[in-house]
């Protein structure tokens, strides 16, 4: 199913759900059962063949029975292996009850209030997010291990009550907020989507034959369950509001949106920009995060970003409704977020916070150290290249030198100087794909459809660039609102990905 087909189908299904919600929910439940019916049916068929073969052997038809046992036994093993696939659990810094009793006490209170399943472990990671991941220990047949994952940046950004609101929302998905059937559909939807990646990688002929059904089934189930999943976001918000109140739930939604943007657009870029000048980071992110958030709370950016978020519409790219739609459903007006006197990290983690901060910073440094050093060396090399060629008139440089000079300027973020040179070098008969792609990226970021000509140059010169160039052309036309060309390039991109 292509992306455009998925969007059109979901739009149609939304109308169907509005007309007859009960019948639609029953249809999705039946579709959810279809996946299990196929899996159990294939398993029963292959095991039945094994027992039939054993029966033939027992009745002195050893040759035929032996072959049947062998063939069906191998098939049954492959079916079980496919269905019993183990999914990787979430990664991060685990916190025990002894280490963070106040956080665990909040989880216990949530469970007592919402009557949901047990949370088996809590993980703190570096994402600005919160989630509860249910990892099936028996593949599609369940026996779930529930992991609550909380990002330390989120804990540093929210107040304790706002954090409780976010946790209540996440817990609402696996408790009774959607009803038993709704919670089951929510859970298996996520499991099927995670298994889709595994099934797509099967290589044996039987594996491909068996999982062919799921490669057809999962996109359809995803589309049908998408409508319910969006409704479940509203239901989870209501579960949060019952736990902490509508005002706090609304405050948490706004704070997460606005402060998440600060982290993505201000904090992390400023930190990584140090690599241009320093061989090692000047400060550790998690240790500096609370101070950065407090300073940012005094700026006008939060107000601007809140209204930007409120202007966004609900789309089919995500099951989460827009911020405005969620606030409207709660019956709440937007209020610009402030920085809490005491963050959720301070109140819920207490004495464990310094250790957790230090562990996450150490893990972050290990993960980025090589990339940081590579960026630092690349910038130094670019500076040397600009100094070496800068005294010459760029117009008199050979095309290869002009390309290197322009790319070096681009590495140093001197985009306005680099762009005309990149275009000249790309349009030369001996121009290369790298300069054409670089020129196309800059123009596309500026919303200039002249970028497509450079993407086409890059594709002609280097086949490896075809997927990226096609995707960027599609994104450009979507951004400037040319629907016909968006769909044309989307179709091209989907054909490339499918091959």
Image: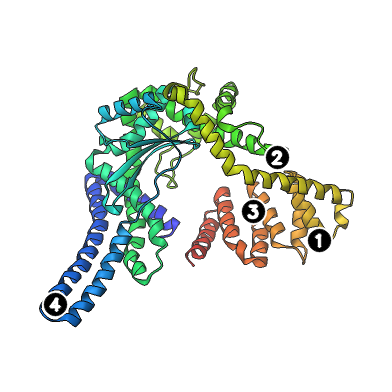
Please, what secondary structure does the residue beneath circle 1 have? helix
Residue at point 44% right, 25% down? Answer: 349
- Which type of secondary structure does the marked residue at label 2 adopt? loop
Instruction: Report which residue position mark 4 lands on.
Output: 56
Q: Give neighbour class at mark 2: few <14, some 14-19, many 20+ (Cα, 10 Å).
A: some
The residue where tag 2 is placed is: 279
Please tell me in which quadrant of the rendered image residue 235 appears.
top left
- Whole-Å distance between the Cαs marked 3 and 4? 70 Å
Q: CA distance from mark 2 to mark 4?
A: 73 Å
Number of other residues with Cα within 10 Å of mark 4, as a class: few under 14, some 14 to 19, many 20 or more: some
Q: Are marks 1 and 2 in contact (CB under 8 Å)?
A: no
Foreground residue among 167 and 81: 81
Q: Earlier in the sequence, mark 1 or mark 4?
A: 4
Of badges 1 and 2, the one in the foreground is: 2
Query: Percent from the top left, x then y, of residue 37?
Result: 22, 59
Q: Quadrant of residue 489?
A: bottom right
Q: Horizontal placement of 205 versus 313: left or right?
A: left
User: How far, Cα to Cα, is label 1 from label 4?
Assistant: 78 Å
Label drawn at residue 399: 1
Q: Residue at x 30, y 58 (%)?
A: 83
Number of numbered callouts drawn: 4
For disc 3, the marked residue is 449
Residue furthest top as drawn: 341
């Amino acid at each position: 199913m292509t992306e455009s087909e998925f969007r059109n189908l979901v739009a149609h299904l939304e109308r169907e759900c509005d007309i007859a919600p009960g019948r639609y929910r029953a249809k999705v439940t039946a579709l959810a059962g279809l996946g299990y019916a196929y899996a159990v049916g294939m398993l029963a068929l292959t095991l039945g063949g094994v027992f039939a073969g054993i029966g033939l052997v027992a009745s002195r038809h050893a040759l035929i029975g032996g072959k049947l046992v062998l063939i069906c036994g191998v098939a049954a093993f492959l079916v079980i292996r496919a269905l019993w696939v183990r999914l990787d659990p979430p990664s991060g810094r685990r916190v025990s009850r002894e280490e963070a009793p106040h956080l665990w006490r909040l989880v216990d209170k949530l469970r007592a209030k919402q009557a949901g399943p047990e949370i088996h472990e809590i993980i703190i990671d570096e994402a600005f997010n919160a989630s509860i991941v249910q990892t099936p220990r028996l593949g599609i047949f369940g026996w779930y291990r529930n992991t609550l994952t909380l990002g330390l940046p989120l804990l540093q950004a929210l107040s304790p009550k706002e954090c409780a609101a976010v946790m209540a929302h996440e817990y609402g998905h696996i408790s009774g907020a959607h009803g038993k059937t709704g919670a089951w559909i929510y859970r298996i939807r996520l499991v099927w989507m995670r298994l889709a990646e595994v099934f797509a990688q099967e290589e044996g002929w039987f594996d491909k034959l068996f999982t062919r059904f799921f490669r057809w089934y999962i996109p359809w189930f995803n589309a049908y369950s998408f409508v319910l999943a969006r409704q479940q976001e509203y239901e989870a918000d209501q579960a949060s509001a019952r736990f902490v109140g509508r005002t706090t739930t609304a405050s948490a939604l706004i704070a997460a949106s606005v402060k998440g943007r600060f982290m993505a657009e201000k904090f992390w870029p400023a930190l990584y920009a140090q690599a241009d000048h320093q061989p090692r980071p000047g400060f550790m992110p998690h240790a500096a995060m609370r101070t950065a958030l407090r300073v940012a709370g005094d700026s006008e950016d939060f107000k601007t970003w809140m209204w930007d978020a409120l202007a966004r519409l609900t789309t089919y790219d995500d099951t989460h409704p827009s911020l405005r739609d969620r606030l409207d459903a709660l019956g709440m007006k937007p209020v610009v977020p402030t920085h809490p006197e005491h963050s959720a990290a301070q109140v819920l983690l207490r004495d464990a916070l310094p250790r957790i901060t230090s562990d996450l910073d150490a893990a972050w440094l290990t993960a980025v150290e090589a990339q940081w050093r590579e960026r630092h060396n690349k910038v130094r090399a670019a500076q040397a290249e600009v100094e070496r060629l800068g005294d010459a008139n760029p117009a008199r440089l050979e095309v290869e030198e002009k390309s290197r000079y322009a790319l070096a300027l681009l590495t140093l973020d001197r985009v306005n100087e680099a762009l005309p040179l990149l275009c000249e070098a790309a349009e030369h008969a001996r121009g290369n794909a790298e300069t054409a792609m670089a020129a196309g990226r800059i123009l596309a970021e500026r919303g200039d459809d002249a970028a497509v000509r450079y993407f086409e140059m890059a594709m002609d010169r280097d086949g490896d660039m075809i997927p990226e160039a096609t995707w960027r052309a599609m994104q450009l036309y979507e951004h400037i609102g040319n629907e016909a060309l968006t769909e044309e390039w989307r179709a091209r991109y989907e054909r490339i990905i499918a091959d």
